[in-house]
Image (tube, rainbow, N blue to C red):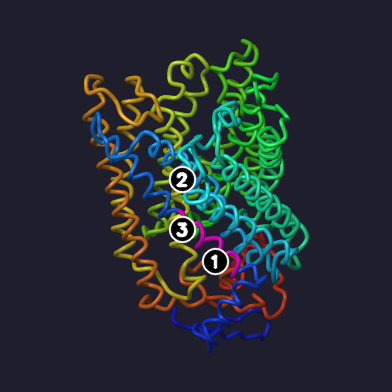
Amino acid sequence: MADQSYPVGQGVEVTVERSPARGTWLEVVHDWITTVDHKKLGIMYIAYALVFLLVAGFEAMLIRIQLIKPHNDFLSPYTFNRMFTMHGTTMVFLVGMPILFGFGNYLVPLMIGARDMAFPRLNAFSFWISSFAGLLLYYSFIGGVGLSGTGSAPDIAWFAYAPLTEKAFSPGHTTDYWAIAILANGIGSIGTAINIIATVFCMRCKGMTLSRIPLLPWLYATMSFLVLVAVSPLTACQAMLLLDRYLGAHFFDTQAGGSAILWAHFFWIFGHPEVYVLVLPAFAFANEIIPVFSRKAIFGYPAMVAASVGIGFISLGVWAHHMFTIGMTSFGNAFFTLSTMLVSIPTGIKTFNWLATIWGGKIRFETPMLFSIAFLFQWVIAGLTGIMLSVSAWNWQLHNSYFVVAHFHYVLVGAIVFMIFAAIYYWYPKITGRMLDETLGNWHFWLMVIGFHVTFDVMHFPGLLGMPRQIYTYEPDRGWNTLNFIVSIGGFIQAIAILIFVYNMVHSYFRGDDAGPDPWDAWTLEWATASPPPVYNFAIEPEVASRRPLWDRKHPEDPDSAFE
């Protein structure tokens, strides 16, 4: 494990110093700011997202403290509105997408045997404009002049329904900061999506046919096509909103003949595919981690690729199930109910294939696998509550209740965030050259799982009892008091788990065991180079003959290439 050199190609040895000689701090900063290396940009995406994860988590805790008891005055109504707006916007746009783009940036070229992304400078531009979006959004705390003439963050919720974002209802500049930040973030996301698609299909190494591409790049390519289709309308409607607010365009101003429903369509054409933009990379991580820790090849590779592409197509036709209460026709309600349920077919295929991969395997219950198993369990449960909400009659009863909040946190935290943790534990050794501490990883996992279930299992019940989302307090006679207290306690347990995780990352970076090039005995190409990889990734271009090139190298007596 401690060996720092590894054969990259025939007769070629690469040795990487983990702590190369460094220049002054100014030279180091200049090197990172001007870099176009996909690995450094990937690390910056991940670091940027983790910082905002802590910020959004802090905002979530403020929300839960406010709701821990009825008639609480910990936050004012105005501050509460800003907290849930910034929490939702941050988690979706400044945490979820950047961290997944970060892993894509880092891993896709390595896994297909390339030396960089197809367009390195576009890659750097995409990162910096996305970073500008995050800084601009949070600058609104001091720069977004609100009603009182002082700084204030946006208070329009993460979906910013029209016409409440028009000048008449949202004066000052807080909404402008929100709209420009989302617009800039959209430009960065579209740039990254174009880059990933071009890289996956044009930069593959010799022998890597379409049927040999690892599943992670396949799913990232599918996700990137979804980004192009779904994020573009969102970016366009931010421009339309700004035209409304400053040039009197009236796209969404109902008092001047505009349509609030037009905004809802634009937003949810982005909003629901966005769930799959986030979850497809989580699927991609599971596709890589579960086989390695089960010591079996992934079951049903062609079906997994087809199911992933199928999810991408079907998810584009489900957006209006967020709009059942808006007054659609019976045909519209029935269509979007059925199309939403249809997504369960390809996702079911993937779930059964993961279970078939685990079945009969020699399972290693290390932290990446623990989070992957928790993800499988949570994904199935979240899917069941999703089917409940896809039924229009049921949706009418629960729309805008805490049941919906519990459902999407089941998906976004229980499935996606759990797999992001699994991915960090799995690829941290490749990125840093150090292993994360397994004991701390276990503490992180168990506290996270317990805190998650205490929070979000219980949160379903105040929703069923009629508690609406986004209210800053409630009356003590509604039967929600004990449930909200338990939910808030669960939030504190998760916060402790996150702090352990952060400590583990920092501690292990300086004191962790050396990882070596291939600490998990894995099979894909990123493990065929040193940890961390050299600037050029591979001294000579790799050549592959199967979907598991490292297996072939390690087991020449029983190579996969003999059976493909």
Q: Nearer the viewer, residue 33 or 314?
A: 33
Which residue is found at the position 33% from the left and 54% from the top? 445
Classify residue 315 by image quadrant: top right
Residue type at tag 2: Thr
Disc 3, disc 2: CB below 8 Å? no
Screen quadrant of the C terminus = bottom right
Numbered disc 2: secondary structure: loop
Residue 43 located within the stretch drawn in magenta: yes
In the picture provided, is 123 more to the left or to the right than 369? right
Q: SS for tag 1?
A: helix
Q: Is residue 190 inside the magenta stretch?
A: no
Vertical side of 544 occupied by 82: above or below: above
Image location (x, y in percent) of residue 13: 62, 86
Residue 43's label in the rendered image is 1
Residue at image location 66% in from the left, 39% down from the top: 238
Q: Residues within 10 Å of mark 3 (few under 14, many from 20)?
A: some
Which secondary structure type mostly characterizes the magenta part of the structure?
Answer: helix
| Viewer-nearest residue: 391 or 34 | 34
Residue at position x 59%, y 26% in the image:
163
Q: Identify residue type, mark 3.
A: Leu
Disc 1 residue type (three-letter): Ile
Position of 381 relative to 478 (above/below): below
The residue sitting at 35% across, 20% down in the picture is: 466
Q: CA distance from mark 3 to mark 2?
A: 29 Å
Using the image as rendered, state which of residue 213 and residue 28 is in the foreground.
Answer: 28
- Name the residue tied to disc 2: 150
**Pointer 3: what residue?**
50
* Magenta stretch in the rendered image: 40-52
Judged from this view, the residue extending furthest toward the right is 202
